[in-house]
């Protein structure tokens, strides 16, 4: 009488083959998840960058001039910023839109973009964006219109080790 069943060798071979198949399937899922996470982060960074630049641009368009540009250590001279056309790293910027005390103020605090209205030195409290690693500003000259003020903003976003950079050029209409 023969015993029906599997030998130890057959069990070990089938276990090895099963492990290989499961390993391959898991590697596909792991790679797909990494790709999904990368695409999700990229999409989030693009959305945030566009939203932040569009939000600031709407306010700059309504402004008459820039009243403050500073980074963590320096407050830049407005004359210098306007005359050089150079790009400056900033974490706070203000644009005048009415009387001297009416400013749109934008401030980057620990990767969070904040907004407020008031005096140029105020601390804005309304959050309107995340993941901002750096913001840069330059004032461009445009001789095509009399007294035209043109501001170029560039932001660098970072999330999960991925970076995204976007820029926008805006003309102030209320000169």
Image (cartoon, helix red, strand yellow):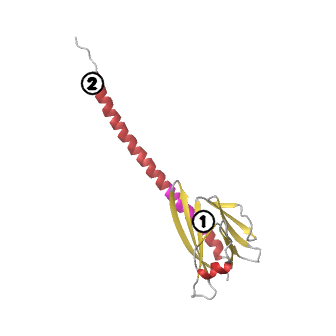
For disc 2, the marked residue is: 9
Where is residue 134? Give x, y as percent: 58, 64
Q: Which residue is mark 1?
A: 52
Q: State the residue at coordinates (69%, 69%).
A: 105
Q: Residue furthest top?
A: 1
Q: How far from the left and from the top, in percent, is residue 112?
A: 63, 59
Image quarter where the C terminus lies is bottom right
Q: Look at the image and say whether residue 132 sits in the magenta stretch.
A: no
Label 2 or label 1, whichever lies nearer to me, is: 2
In the image, what residue occupies the spot 67% across and 81% down?
79
Q: Magenta residues?
A: 41-55
Horizontal and vertical percent for residue 125? 71, 61
Residue 159 relative to residue 33: left or right: right
**Horizontal and vertical percent for residue 174?**
67, 81
> Is residue 17 positioned above or below 11 on the image?
below
For numbered disc 1, what is the local secondary structure?
helix
Looking at the image, which is closer to me, 121 or 40? 121
Depicted 59 relative to depicted 160: above or below = below
* Mark 2 surroundings: few (<14), some (14-19) or many (≥20) residues within 10 A: few
> Which comes sooner in the sequence, label 2 or label 1?
2
Magenta: main secondary structure equals: helix
Residue 29, quarter of the rendered image: top left
Q: Quadrant of the N terminus?
A: top left
Give the CA distance from mark 2 to mark 1.
64 Å
């Amino acid at each position: 009488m023969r015993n029906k069943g599997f030998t130890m060798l057959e069990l070990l071979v089938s276990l090895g083959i099963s492990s290989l198949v499961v390993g391959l399937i898991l590697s596909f899922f792991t790679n797909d998840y990494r790709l999904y996470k990368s695409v999700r982060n990229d999409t989030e960074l693009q959305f945030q960058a566009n939203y932040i630049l569009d939000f600031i641009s709407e306010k700059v368009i309504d402004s008459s001039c820039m009243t403050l540009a500073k980074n963590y250590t320096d407050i830049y001279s407005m004359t210098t910023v306007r005359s050089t056309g150079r790009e400056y790293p900033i974490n706070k910027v203000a644009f005048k839109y009415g009387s001297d005390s009416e400013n749109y103020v934008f401030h980057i605090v620990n990767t969070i973009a904040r907004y407020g209205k008031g005096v140029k030195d105020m601390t804005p409290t309304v959050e309107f964006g995340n993941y901002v690693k750096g913001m840069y500003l330059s004032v461009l000259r445009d001789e095509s219109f009399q007294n035209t003020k043109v501001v170029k903003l560039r932001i660098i976003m970072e999330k999960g080790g991925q970076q995204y950079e976007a820029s926008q050029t805006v003309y102030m209409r209320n000169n």
